[in-house]
Image (cartoon, helix red, strand yellow):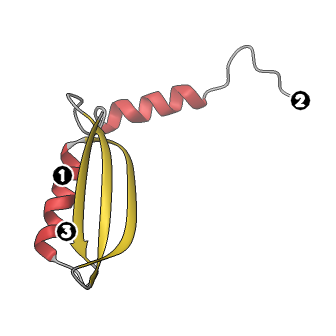
Amino acid sequence: MQYHVQRIPAAGSAELEEEFNRFLRSHRVIAVQKNLETFDGSPCWCFCVEWLEGSPAGGGSVESRGRNRASRNAASPYTAVI
């Protein structure tokens, strides 16, 4: 498990936001925590990202994820209908 910490001014920063979004898209993210904090007298969003090292982002193609979801939602032959 790896951690990445990012701070972005509450007023916004297009460059930092894009950098953070690029990081999120390129890693297998497990959890994100965010807090509004004050840093050097200015409000900022502080993010802590927990991610898996060595795992590709996305977890497969859209098609395969759709098939997996459909098969998980299908009724089991052992399911009783009441």
Residue 52: image location, x then y, percent: 28, 34
Toward the viewer: 24 or 4?
Answer: 4
Mark positioned earlier in the residue sequence (3 or 2): 3
Q: In the picture, residue 6 is in which quadrant? A: bottom left
Give the residue furthest to the right: 82
Toward the viewer: 16 or 39?
Answer: 39
Q: Is residue 42 left or right of residue 72?
A: left
Q: Is residue 79 left or right of residue 12?
A: right
- Numbered label attached to residue 23: 1
Against 32, residue 36 (above or below) is below
Toward the viewer: 25 or 43?
Answer: 43
Callouts 1 and 3 close, C-beta under 8 Å: no
Toward the viewer: 61 or 2?
Answer: 2
Residue 11: image location, x then y, percent: 25, 85
Q: Identify the element where label 2 is drawn.
A: loop
Against 77, residue 46 (above or below) is below
Residue annotated with mark 2: 82
Against 78, residue 34 (above or below) is below
Callouts 2 and 1 close, C-beta under 8 Å: no
Residue type for callout 3? Glu
- Numbered label attached to residue 17: 3
Q: Is residue 33 left or right of residue 60?
A: right
Q: CA distance from mark 3 to mark 2?
A: 50 Å
Residue 79: image location, x then y, percent: 76, 20
Against 5, residue 26 (above or below) is above
Residue 82: image location, x then y, percent: 89, 29
Task: Tell me which residue sits at (42%, 35%) in the image.
Answer: 66
Callouts 3 and 2 close, C-beta under 8 Å: no
